[in-house]
Amino acid sequence: MREFVLKCYRNSVIRYVFFGGCTTMVNLITFYLFRYVFQIPLNPANLLSIILAILFAYVVNSRYVFQEPCHGFREHLISGGKFFGARAVTMLLELGGVWLLVEYLQLPDMLGKFLVQFLVLILNYLFSRFFVFTRGKTKS
């Protein structure tokens, strides 16, 4: 069993799916809390939940998924700049997608948020794998 777990952990795609799922849960749970517990309007609640998820994702992606070997502030700044720039693109897509599904197609807000997550997850992986975390690539 230990060997199976280690084999899975060595695969960056499996690590990304696991930590991407954790990031999605951070996004969905905080969105739910902002909307239904704190009664924050749709777009601000969505923006806040995305920001929290992005911060969480940077830590787990750089450290555990892509195992980026950053040494020093400058390397973290470059890696972080590329990461947050790429996530800004998918954040705009997520903000627009949720708004479109909820406001125009009249889907429940949690359903709209959940549906958009699939496209965002795929794009975030592609950006992270091929644009952001390129120095510490390990065999997948």
Image: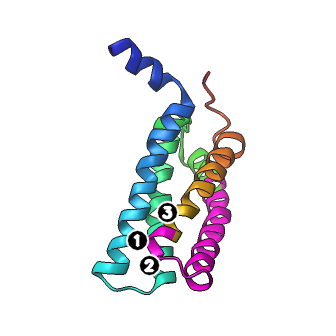
Residue at coordinates 58% horizontally, 63% vertically from top-left? 116
Q: Say above or below: 61 vs 140.
A: below
Q: In what element is the residue under mark 1?
A: helix
- Residue 94 image position (x, y, % from top left): 60, 68
- Residue 93 image position (x, y, % from top left): 66, 68
| Residue that label 2 marks | 45
Q: Residues within 10 Å of mark 2 (few under 14, many from 20)?
A: some
Asked whether the beta carbons under mark 3 and mark 1 sit within 8 Å of each other, the answer is no
Which region shows up in magenta?
82-111
Residue at coordinates 67% horizontally, 57% vertically from top-left? 86
- Residue 119 image position (x, y, % from top left): 63, 56
Query: Magenta region, mostly helix, strand or loop?
Result: helix
Q: Nearer the viewer, mark 2 or mark 3?
A: 3
Asked whether the beta carbons under mark 2 and mark 1 sit within 8 Å of each other, the answer is yes
- Residue 135 image position (x, y, % from top left): 66, 34
Q: Amino acid at mark 2?
A: Ala
